[in-house]
Image (tube, rainbow, N blue to C red):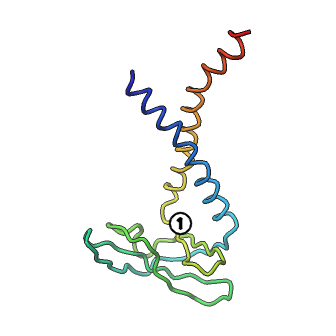
Amino acid sequence: MWFIRAVGLVLAVSLFFCIPHVVKKHNALRTAAQYDGIVVGHKEHRDNNGISYALEVEYQGADFKTHTFVNHPATNPPAKVIGDRVRIFDHGDGKRLEVLAFQTMYLGYWIWFCISFCAFGCFIAPTLMELIYLKR
C-alpha cells in the first residue's frame, strides 16, 4: 500500500512541474508558423553514446522557396523514414526550427497532466471532504 501511495504522491507533485511545461509547449506550437515537410535523408551523428541519426527535412517556407535543414536531437533508429511527411514549426525568434516527429510524445505530456491531476485529486479529496463535511 505504501508503494502505491508513494507513486501517487510523486505523480501529484510532478503536476506542479508538468503544468508550466505543457502550457508553454502548447502555446509555442499554437503560435508558431507551421509548414509541411518531407524527410529527404538522415544525417549520422556520432558521440560517446554511439551513433544516432538526425532528420534532414525539406519544406516550402513562407517565401515559397524550398528550404532544407537538419533537426536536432538525433535518435537511433531514425524518428522517421525517408519520404515521411512531418510538421515543421517556425517560432519566428531566429532559433532552430522544430520538427514534430513524435506527435505521441506531445500527447504524452497531456496524458501525464491528466493522470497527475487525478492523483492530486485523490490525495486532496479526503482532506477537503473532512474539512467541509466532518469538522463543522
The residue labelled by disc 1 is: 100
Q: Give the residue at x 36% y 80%.
A: 43
**36 displayed left or right of 77:** right
Q: Quick one: quadrant of the C terminus? A: top right
**Kind of element beneath mark 1:** strand
Residue 56 placement (x, y as % from top left): 44, 80
Q: Residues within 10 Å of mark 1 (few under 14, many from 20)?
A: some
**In this view, 131 is above or below 119:** above
| Residue 110 shown left or right of residue 76 in the figure | right
At x 64% / y 54%, what residue is drawn? 23
Identity of the residue drawn at 65% across and 78% down: 93
Q: Nearer the viewer, residue 3 or 87?
A: 3
Name the residue furthest front. 135
- Position of residue 71 relative to residue 16, above or below, is below
Q: Nearer the viewer, residue 52 or 57?
A: 52
Q: Residue sitting at 62 percent across and 23 percent down?
A: 125
Viewer-side residue, 30 vs 22? 22
Residue 27 placement: quadrant: bottom right
- On the rendered image, what quadrant is the N terminus found in? top left
Three-letter amino acid code at disc 1? Leu
